């Protein structure tokens, strides 16, 4: 790559779609909308016709979660969805444009240490499947926050559900903004127009198709997203003369970092920050967040849910690895002329889009496929958030907090109104997000506030059996204050210039003549900044979880711990069942406990029968009151 190439692409006007790119992009929009229409009308009618023929025993076993079978189908798919579409939807719940563009810029600017997040993700999957999922499956909740009322009280449930809604409202504009800036770069269309179009399309098919439209649309959108990034990576690898040259260049530029064992919590991407902080962040999101639990509960059994987590883990590990490698590709291409310094882009999160246009932009249709993939990721994440947040507003806030009893029609109107209102709020907040940079850290920091606190509450309930509602309330307040204090304090410090991201060195030797020097990157003395504000964003979530559990446990002891014998074992994680007293496990109809009391009653009854003679025996059997009946 020489100066001529950089000069050729210096003008943003050359970064435009070919008509073939528009065709590919429009097809994605049409398919998304068509899927919503299909599951909102045609597929819905077919399902309704099959319902009367369902197995009677199975129908009796299932409860109507939201007051009617129609709402249950709209929000949970009647708990009959398939493993693979749900697993792909789980991928879509987390992977958005934030992951695609943010991960690439993270590797480009800070090296490959973040790549080890895949280890934390594998550990997360094991914990989620064995600690949290069995509890939700046993209770058959529709909203994860129902658990908090069962375990503590309605106040704790309301606090957690309101925090979830606020968290998703903050996260919605991030989902919209990322693909908007990517599309704007290659078309010149205003970012706000693009974000509005994304939102309208997503609101439409989520509105009419419900969870089925969301899950099945997510499935093929995630596949398109993965294929688009893989194609760009393969072509980029070919143009870069293979893997060897890519890793050699990255090593020479100091980007290959896997063993940064610096114990300082101020190090942005250390081994400990990525493994420990990444594990807690991914666990808090995937274990109890409603966007994930709703999909787990849309499956018919615990085993199916665990399989979906396994497939989700494989998919997410593969995808993040591809995005990390794409970061090395981008560095290989721009190693001698940083596009941000050269003025080719205005934000780090535009690195991958400009790379795509400069490397494969001459292959008509490929840029369109890539942008369609980024849009697909955004649509899948946005639809998941809209659907899940509407469910929480209905079930946890309106019904749970305000104790309102709604008819089927009123519930449907409320849910659909929430989806529309949330879409409008998301578009409005994009204006605010434009003033922030570093999408990956911003998204992680803001989400960590609610994710850390709510995960701390659920962990307190499932793993600390003596915790009570007073401890849970105190823990929630402490967790939210700590994580919020650190997160917003650090963001304010960055905005004021007191903190600066210490990026790895860049070069401009092959940039056009008007870019001859690299901006000064002096060592910033941050010792005057409050220590908690200097922490790596990876530590915000663990601090929130630890604060919630620690304070919750202490306050529970001080205010009178819960009596273990009065707890239902289903409310606690199975990994601690062996430490619980027998009273936590009520006998089922199929079990006979040979305790001292019921053995004495049986002997007394038998002695009475023998004294009464044959007539009493006949009456006892005829009346169905003998021990044989009690044993069934």
Image (cartoon, helix red, strand yellow):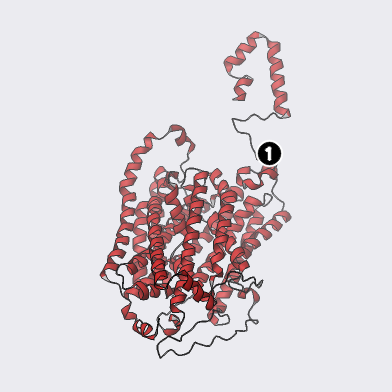
Q: Which residue is mark 1?
A: 583
413 displayed left or right of 450: left
Q: x%, y% of residue 18?
A: 28, 71
Above or below for 108 versus 573: below
Q: Quadrant of the N terminus?
A: bottom left
Query: Dot 1: within a 10 Å radius of its alpha carbon, few (fewer than 14), some, or many (20 or more) residues?
Result: few
Which element is circle 1 on?
A: helix
Q: Nearer the viewer, residue 410 or 509?
A: 509
Q: Nearer the viewer, residue 616 or 438?
A: 438
Q: x%, y% of residue 575?
A: 64, 47
40 displayed left or right of 334: left
Residue shown at the point (57%, 80%) measured from the top left: 499
Residue shown at the point (68%, 14%) measured from the top left: 609
Q: x%, y% of residue 261?
A: 64, 70
Residue shown at the point (45%, 67%) measured from the top left: 100
Above or below for 436 versus 541: below
Please identify the quarter of the rendering in which residue 15 is found. bottom left
Q: Nearer the viewer, residue 404 or 586?
A: 586
């Amino acid at each position: 790559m020489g100066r001529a190439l950089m000069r050729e692409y210096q003008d943003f006007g050359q970064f435009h779609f070919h008509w073939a790119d528009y065709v590919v992009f429009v097809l994605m929009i049409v398919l998304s909308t068509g899927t919503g229409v299909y599951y909102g009308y045609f597929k819905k009618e077919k399902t309704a016709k099959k319902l009367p023929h369902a197995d009677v025993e199975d129908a009796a076993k299932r409860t109507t979660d939201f007051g009617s079978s129609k709402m249950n189908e709209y929000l949970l798919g009647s708990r009959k969805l398939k493993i693979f579409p749900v697993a792909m939807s789980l991928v879509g719940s987390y992977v958005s444009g934030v992951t695609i563009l943010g991960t690439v810029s993270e590797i480009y600017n800070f090296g490959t240490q973040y790549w080890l997040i895949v280890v934390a993700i594998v550990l997360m999957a094991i914990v989620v499947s064995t600690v949290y999922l069995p509890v939700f499956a046993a209770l058959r909740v529709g909203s994860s926050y129902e658990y908090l009322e069962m375990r503590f009280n309605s106040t704790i449930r309301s606090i957690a559900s309101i925090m979830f809604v606020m968290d998703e409202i903050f996260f919605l504009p991030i989902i919209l903004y990322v693909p908007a800036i990517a599309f704007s770069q290659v078309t010149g269309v205003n970012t706000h127009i693009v974000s509005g179009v994304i939102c309208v399309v997503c609101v439409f098919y989520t509105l009419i198709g419900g969870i089925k439209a969301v899950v099945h649309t997510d499935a093929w959108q995630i596949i398109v997203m993965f294929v688009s990034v893989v194609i760009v990576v393969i072509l980029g690898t070919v143009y870069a003369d293979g893997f060897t040259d890519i890793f050699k260049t990255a090593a020479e530029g100091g980007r290959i970092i896997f063993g940064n064992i610096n114990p300082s919590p101020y190090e942005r991407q250390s081994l400990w920050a990525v493994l420990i902080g990444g594990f807690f962040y991914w666990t808090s999101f995937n274990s109890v967040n409603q966007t994930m639990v709703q999909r787990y509960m849309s499956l018919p059994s615990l085993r199916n849910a665990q399989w979906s987590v396994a497939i989700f883990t494989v998919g997410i590990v593969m995808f993040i690895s591809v995005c990390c490698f794409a970061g090395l590709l981008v560095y290989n291409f721009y190693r001698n002329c940083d596009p941000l310094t050269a003025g080719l882009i205005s934000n780090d999160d535009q690195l991958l889009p400009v790379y795509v246009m400069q490397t494969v932009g001459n292959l008509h249709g490929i840029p369109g496929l890539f942008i369609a993939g980024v849009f697909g990721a955004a649509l899948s994440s946005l639809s998941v958030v809209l659907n899940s947040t509407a469910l929480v507003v209905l079930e946890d806030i309106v019904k749970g907090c305000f104790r309102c009893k709604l008819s089927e029609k009123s519930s449907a109107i409320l849910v659909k109104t929430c989806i529309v209102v949330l879409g409008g709020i998301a578009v409005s907040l994009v204006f605010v997000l434009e003033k922030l940079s570093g999408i990956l850290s911003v998204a992680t920091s803001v989400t960590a506030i609610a994710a850390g606190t709510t995960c701390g509450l659920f962990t307190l309930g499932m793993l600390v059996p003596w915790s009570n509602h007073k401890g849970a309330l105190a823990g929630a307040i402490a967790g939210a204050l700590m994580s919020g204090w650190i997160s917003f304090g650090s963001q304010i410090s960055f905005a004021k210039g007191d903190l600066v991201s210490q990026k790895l060195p860049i070069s401009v030797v092959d940039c056009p003549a008007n870019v001859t020097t690299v901006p000064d990157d002096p060592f910033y003395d941050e010792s005057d900044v409050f220590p908690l504000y200097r922490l790596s964003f990876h530590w915000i979530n663990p601090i929130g979880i630890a604060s919630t559990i620690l304070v919750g446990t202490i306050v529970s002891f001080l205010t009178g711990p819960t009596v273990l014998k009065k707890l239902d074992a289903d409310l606690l994680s199975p990994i601690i069942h062996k430490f619980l007293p027998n009273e936590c496990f009520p006998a089922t109809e199929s079990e006979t406990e040979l305790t001292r009391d019921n053995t004495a009653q049986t002997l007394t009854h038998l002695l009475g029968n023998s004294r009464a003679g044959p007539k009493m025996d006949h009456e006892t059997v005829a009346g169905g009151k003998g021990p044989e009946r009690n044993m069934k």
